[in-house]
Image: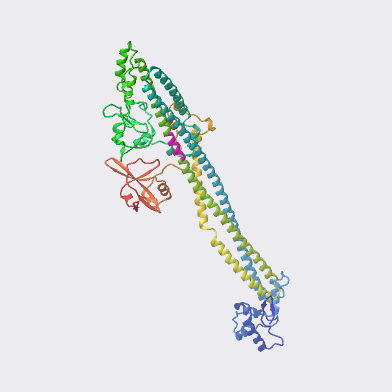
């Protein structure tokens, strides 16, 4: 036996070798050869020299080697056909026809495998390019979302600065009000003419400063640039005050009707104060309401001021103190005129006792002349009016401060939502990069397999002997088998379903948000919002002299929706049953309510979603938030799998 190329070849039959010896060597080769068993018969058949008949079908049965039927022709016919089929390949004309036929068949298989490799490579290359484009698109979406988030962040910073500015001005006005209370006390306790004139001068100076301060506040707020900037990014719902229907919300909003300046009216029930059943009572925070309204605000021994929302414990006597200042002011407003200068001191003393006798703590002013007392009373009325004006400005500033704070919170919510969208895009971009690297790696593996196929193809084309042909065919089969397995793995792994669906979802959501933002910006340009520089914006003429709330409303009109808060849509019971994406969004935002109407009165119960379970909350008598969708309580709604919150 002889070896070639690391493969053990069978013994050659013929010459002076006897049949018995050749059979013995063939049996030994059959036991020790590394050639695949199914190719033993082919190897033995190809080992016979040219010019000999092939005894393989008979001899191989003697040694137990399985074989395939093979027609044996004469050497002359083999040589002629060999020259015809492989005459263009030098070096293989000396091979037998059967060997050349096997090589040609193997060559055709290798060429088909190479063609298949090229097809798979083209698909992988195209997919790699597509995924790379996806990653770039996600980066573009990230940049656009980042720009939107920067706008929200800038608006939130402006809102915070405006809130601090309003708070600072409110504290200044509050300090001025305290000074007015101080000079009011001085006016009431002046015991001599000189002290009275000095007190009147001090009061005039304090009132002048306070008037100037209030004018500065009303001119300063609202800041046009801040409001218009916030309008571009903040939903209208967050900027609107509460409307009629919620008495507390009305009081926080402030009243802008013709009765707002009516000092004699209770700001809650808008009923005129009197000295019997609707006496004015002042809470510790300084705000005054009629007795029935204060009694109606009592809850568990505490009262919440409808104006500033500060809670106060009810005094042990059960009532807050009566505001005698307001009562005295109301008396004068109802017709009590100031007396003219008295002709004599005795008359002054008598009228002084009559006009000031009802004021506790002012007995020391009875010795003053009527003219001095008249001046003090006039100054007291001016101070009371100035205090009331202070309270009005404070209420407006407090309301504006609350509104701006809500704007800032809404900007934070928008930032969080934009950040979530950016995180989605970032995750999708990372997945796209990983998928691109995976496709590139697989493409390189297929390319390496193609190079191996080209190598074995060259070996098949240059095989010069039967042994080399057998070895080359085995190598080619092994390479093609590995390449086929590699291609099947590629086609099974690519594309990755999770990656593609994640990228698709992130792209759709981000594009929807950006398209909505573009729509809002276009609408703002059409409406003329923020068309120029920040300082170019101005208030409408009709709103320039109105209250802070009126000027805010004027700046916010016409209302424009936020880019991330589209107009509310209808919702059906079937949407809740199948939990569509639209229903999920509304449930997560707390905008779905079940309405129950009895005897003409409606109450609402909110619906929420937790762990893919619907929860129905208790019925409440409360106003619906802006953008809410409602479903009537009935059989269709109650047929849903609803749970009660624990």
Colour scheme used in the picture?
rainbow
Q: Nearer the viewer, residue 243 or 596?
A: 243
Asked if residue 67 can be seen in this view, the reply is yes
Q: Is residue 497 left or right of residue 629?
A: right
Q: Nearer the viewer, residue 350 or 336?
A: 350
Q: Nearer the viewer, residue 646 or 174?
A: 174
- Quadrant for residue 455, please give it: bottom right
- Quadrant for residue 460, please give it: bottom right
Query: Of all residues shown, which one is farthest toward the top?
Result: 343
On whether residue 417 falls in the magenta region, the answer is no
Q: Nearer the viewer, residue 545 or 120?
A: 545
Question: Where is residue 564 shown, x and y percent of the image?
Answer: 47, 43
Q: Is residue 14 left or right of residue 227?
A: right
Q: Residue at x 56, y 51 (%)?
A: 135
On whether residue 402 falls in the magenta region, the answer is yes
Q: Residue at x 34, y 33 (%)?
A: 283
Question: Compared with residue 352, is residue 14 higher up or lower down, i.e. above or below?
Answer: below
Question: Compared with residue 266, is residue 454 higher up or lower down, i.e. above or below?
Answer: below
Asked if residue 123 can be seen in this view, the reply is no
Question: Where is residue 591 shown, x and y percent of the image?
Answer: 39, 45
Please report the bounds of the magenta region as a residue range: 399-408
User: What secondary structure is the stretch in magenta mostly built from?
Assistant: helix
Q: Residue at x 65, y 78 (%)?
A: 43
Question: Where is residue 74 shown, x and y percent of the image?
Answer: 68, 80
Question: Where is residue 590 shown, x and y percent of the image?
Answer: 40, 46
Query: Of all residues shown, which one is farthest toward the right?
Result: 90
């Amino acid at each position: 036996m002889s070896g070639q190329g690391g493969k053990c070849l069978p013994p050659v039959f013929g010459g002076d070798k006897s049949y018995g010896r050749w059979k013995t060597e063939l049996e030994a080769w059959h036991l020790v050869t590394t050639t695949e068993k199914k190719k033993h018969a082919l190897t033995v058949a190809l080992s016979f020299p040219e010019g000999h008949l092939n005894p393989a079908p008979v001899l191989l049965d003697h040694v137990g080697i399985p074989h395939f039927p093979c027609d044996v022709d004469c050497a002359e016919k083999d040589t002629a056909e060999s020259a015809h089929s492989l005459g263009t390949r030098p070096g293989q004309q000396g091979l037998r026809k059967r060997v050349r036929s096997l090589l040609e068949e193997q060559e055709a298989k290798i060429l088909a495998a190479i063609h298949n490799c090229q097809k798979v490579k083209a698909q992988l290359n195209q997919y790699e390019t597509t995924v790379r484009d996806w990653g770039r698109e996600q980066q573009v979406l990230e940049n656009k979302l980042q720009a939107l988030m920067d706008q929200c962040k800038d608006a939130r910073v402006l809102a915070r600065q405006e809130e601090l500015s309003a708070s600072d001005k409110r504290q200044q006005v509050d300090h001025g009000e305290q000074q007015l209370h101080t000079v009011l006390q001085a006016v009431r306790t002046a015991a001599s003419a000189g002290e009275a004139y000095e007190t009147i001068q001090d009061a005039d100076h304090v009132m002048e400063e306070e008037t100037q301060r209030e004018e500065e506040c009303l001119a300063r707020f609202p800041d046009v640039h801040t409001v218009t900037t916030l309008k571009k990014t903040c939903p209208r719902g967050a900027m609107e005050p509460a409307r009629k229907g919620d008495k507390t919300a009305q009081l926080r909003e402030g009243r802008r009707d013709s009765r707002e300046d009516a000092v004699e009216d209770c700001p809650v029930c808008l009923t005129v104060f009197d000295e019997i059943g609707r006496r004015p009572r002042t809470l510790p925070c300084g705000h005054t309401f009629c007795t029935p309204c204060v009694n109606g605000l009592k809850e568990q021994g505490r009262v919440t001021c409808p104006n500033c929302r500060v809670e106060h414990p009810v005094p042990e006597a059960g009532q807050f103190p009566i505001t005698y200042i307001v009562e005295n002011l109301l008396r004068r407003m109802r017709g009590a005129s100031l007396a003219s200068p008295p002709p004599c001191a005795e008359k002054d003393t008598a009228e002084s006792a009559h006009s000031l006798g009802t004021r506790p703590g002012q007995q020391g002013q009875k010795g003053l002349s009527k003219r001095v007392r008249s001046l003090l009373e006039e100054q007291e009325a001016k101070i009371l009016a100035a205090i009331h004006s202070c309270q009005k400005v404070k209420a407006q500033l407090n309301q504006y401060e609350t509104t701006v704070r809500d704007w800032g919170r809404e900007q934070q919510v928008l930032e969080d939502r934009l950040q979530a969208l950016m995180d989605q895009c970032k995750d999708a971009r990372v997945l796209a990069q990983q998928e691109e690297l995976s496709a590139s790696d697989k493409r390189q593996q297929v390319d390496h397999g193609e190079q191996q196929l080209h190598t074995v193809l060259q070996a098949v084309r240059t095989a010069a002997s039967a042994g080399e042909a057998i070895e080359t065919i085995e190598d080619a089969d092994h390479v093609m088998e590995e390449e086929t397995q590699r291609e099947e793995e590629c086609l099974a792994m690519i594309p990755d379903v999770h990656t593609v669906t994640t990228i698709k979802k992130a792209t759709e959501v981000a594009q929807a948000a950006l398209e909505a933002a573009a729509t809002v910006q276009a609408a703002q340009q059409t409406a003329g919002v923020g068309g120029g520089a920040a300082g170019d914006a101005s208030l409408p003429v009709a709103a320039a002299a109105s209250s802070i709330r009126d000027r805010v409303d004027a700046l916010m009109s016409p209302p424009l929706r936020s880019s991330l808060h589209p107009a509310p849509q209808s919702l059906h019971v079937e949407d809740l049953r199948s939990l569509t994406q639209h229903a999920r969004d509304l449930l997560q935002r707390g905008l779905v309510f079940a309405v129950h109407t009895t005897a003409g009165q409606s109450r609402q119960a909110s619906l929420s979603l937790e762990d893919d379970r619907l929860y129905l909350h208790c019925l409440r008598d409360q106003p619906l938030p802006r953008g809410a969708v409602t479903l009537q309580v009935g059989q269709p709604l109650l047929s849903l799998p609803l749970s009660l919150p624990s």
